């Protein structure tokens, strides 16, 4: 068990907060105090941003090969540092089962290696054309300092996704963790200690600090991940300053179970989709459209798979930890109550587990007979609830899946090639999974349509988000420019529109 963490914030190579509001961090499984977190003051925030800008001015001049080496070294530090304390803190702060916290940390190093190589490869490339006597090209330049405003659910991995790309592009980075996961983020920060001094900072705080980072003239790009409402506010504030912003917002992902699905595979996939991390994954399955002919068979298999899940403290033997806060659990309870009051049938769950009423737990819940008028079909639930709708056929399932303001991911279970292609052509979402939900790939763009966000993380687009292009036209020899003036006389008209000559 890590020492009880104390209030501090981190600026490479090690800089601790002198002042600021202090808050208790509460374990959602036990309601015990895990430690304290400090909010940076406005003065500290400005002073840190000045330092990161100064460090970035040097970093952007580092050649691509050396920059790539620094990122590979960082990946090596992640691979060889004992991050057990970080995983334990993550589990205690937000309830994530410990094995999943370890899994999250293990996925961080590869992203630094991926962007180290991509940025190095691109350094030798020129976009554009060359013409005789004139060298015409576009080049990439870093943006400056990027602000990374993070959610609680994958506090370290999602930070690495955008920090790796931003550092590779030549920027400095300032991370603002979610309030709930401040301590695990700070614990992870030690892996950045090998980077140039002050290039990377972590500034804990809440909405006030996040807003200050977006508004500051000392930040030049924003990577936000979080809810739709906050994402809209961040996008508006960044837009008002013409500051590039990636917005990765919430979702309400649909899953379609076709008449051609392998029901055994689909039921296991639905358990992962709906209940992994207690339904607190951005791409959690929330709405299931099940074709009539397989509906009852699927519901039975899905309920049987769900019964295997163990609920409890993330540091014990459990697959289902608590929700992150009372606020989150209250929302889940409200959505389930609303659905049942409008005619949904409770197949399992739908309550606080009686033996675990001293934390923010909620049982994995399956609802059938759901309909579009229920709040759970129209809001992000972000809890362990699967809302099932019976549909006559595959077409109706796609229509239902698309009838949402959200468009993050969508999953389809089918063994029909025709249906698989129809699904990826028609589904209105940034990601489509066929027979395998919630998979991501460092090399492929991640992000949502509609209210679920704008911009992309990962892949080449994830790097482009942190750099700007500059067109350069460079003639070999100085040439006096006379191709347009003075105009020839026969180009002029009189006031009546007649040729003068
Ligand atoms: N699309 C994705 O890739 C993705 C990934 C993970 C989580 N999410 C979404 O994140 C949400 C859960 O995370 P959360 O509860 O931490 O989200 P949240 O929106 O409550 O908070 C996200 C971050 O924004 C900060 N913040 C709050 N108000 C702000 C303001 N006015 N200006 C700037 N920053 C502000 C918070 O302090 C926090 O760091 C869910 O909706 C989930 O779907 C999306
Ligand atoms: C994409 N993923 C699963 C890592 C994080 C979404 O919340």
Image (cartoon, rainbow, N blue to C red):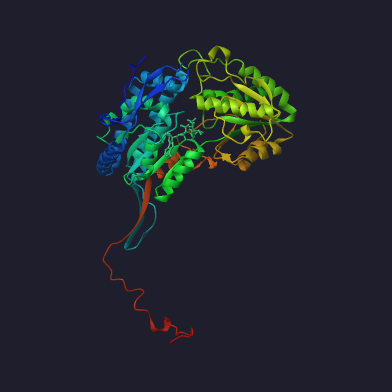
Horizontal side of residue 79 vs 357, given as left or right = left
Q: Residue at x 28, y 43 (%)?
A: 60
Closest to the observer, 31 or 501? 31
State whether residue 167 is above or below residue 496.
Answer: above
Residue furthest to the bottom: 501
Q: Position of residue 471 (x, y in %)?
A: 36, 56
Closest to the observer, 103 or 76? 103
Q: Residue at x 57, y 39 (%)?
A: 406
Q: Position of residue 366 (x, y in %)?
A: 64, 23
Horizontal side of residue 52 vs 255, given as left or right = left
Q: Position of residue 238 (x, y in %)?
A: 41, 46
Q: Position of residue 449 (x, y in %)?
A: 54, 42
State whether residue 438 is above or below residue 61.
Answer: above
- Which quadrant does the N terminus fall into? top left
- Which quadrant does the C terminus fall into? bottom left
The quadrant holding residue 191 is top left
């Amino acid at each position: 068990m890590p020492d009880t963490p104390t209030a501090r914030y981190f600026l490479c190579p090690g800089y601790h907060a002198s002042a600021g509001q202090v808050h208790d961090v509460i374990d959602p499984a036990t309601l015990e105090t895990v430690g304290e977190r400090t909010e940076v003051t406005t003065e500290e925030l400005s002073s840190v941003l000045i330092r990161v800008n100064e460090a970035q001015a040097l970093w952007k001049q580092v050649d691509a090969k050396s920059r790539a080496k620094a990122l590979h070294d960082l990946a090596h530090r992640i691979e060889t540092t004992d991050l057990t304390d970080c995983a334990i803190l993550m589990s205690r702060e937000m309830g994530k089962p410990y094995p999943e916290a370890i899994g999250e940390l293990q996925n961080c190093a590869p992203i630094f290696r991926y962007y180290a190589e991509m940025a190095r490869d691109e350094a030798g490339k020129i976009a554009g054309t060359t013409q005789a006597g004139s060298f015409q090209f576009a080049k990439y330049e870093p943006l400056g300092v990027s602000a990374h405003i993070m959610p609680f659910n994958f506090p370290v991995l999602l930070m690495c996704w955008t920090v790796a790309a931003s550092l590779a592009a030549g920027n400095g980075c300032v991370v603002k963790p979610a309030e709930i996961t401040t301590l695990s983020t700070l614990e992870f920060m030690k892996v950045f200690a090998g980077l140039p001094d002050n290039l990377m900072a972590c500034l804990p705080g809440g909405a006030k600090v996040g807003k200050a980072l977006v508004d500051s003239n000392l930040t030049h790009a924003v990577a936000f991940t979080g809810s739709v409402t906050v994402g809209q506010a961040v996008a508006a504030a960044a837009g008002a300053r013409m500051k590039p912003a990636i917005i990765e917002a919430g979702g309400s992902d649909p899953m379609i179970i076709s008449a051609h699905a392998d029901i055994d595979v689909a039921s296991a996939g639905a358990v992962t989709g709906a209940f992994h991390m207690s339904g607190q994954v951005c791409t959690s399955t929330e709405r299931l459209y099940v074709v009539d002919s397989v509906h009852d068979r699927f519901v039975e298999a899905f309920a049987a798979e769900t019964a295997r899940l163990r609920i409890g403290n993330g540091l014990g033997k459990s697959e289902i930890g608590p929700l992150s806060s009372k606020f989150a659990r209250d929302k889940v309870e409200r959505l389930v109550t609303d659905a049942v009051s409008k005619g949904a049938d409770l197949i399992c769950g739908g309550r606080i587990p009686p033996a675990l009423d001293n934390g923010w737990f909620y049982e994995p819940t399956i609802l059938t007979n759901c309909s579009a008028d229920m709040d759970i079909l129209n809001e992000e639930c972000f809890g362990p609830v699967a809302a099932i709708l019976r549909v006559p056929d595959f077409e109706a399932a796609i229509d239902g899946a698309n009838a949402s303001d959200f468009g993050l991911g969508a999953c389809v279970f089918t063994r029909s090639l025709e249906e698989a292609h129809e699904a990826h052509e028609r589904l209105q979402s940034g990601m489509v999974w066929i027979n395998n939900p919630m998979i991501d790939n460092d090399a492929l763009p991640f992000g949502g349509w509609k209210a679920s966000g704008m911009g992309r993380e990962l892949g080449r687009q994830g790097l482009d988000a942190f750099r700007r292009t500059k067109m350069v036209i460079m003639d070999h020899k100085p040439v006096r420019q006379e191709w347009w003036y003075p105009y020839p006389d026969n180009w002029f008209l009189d006031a009546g529109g007649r040729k003068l000559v």
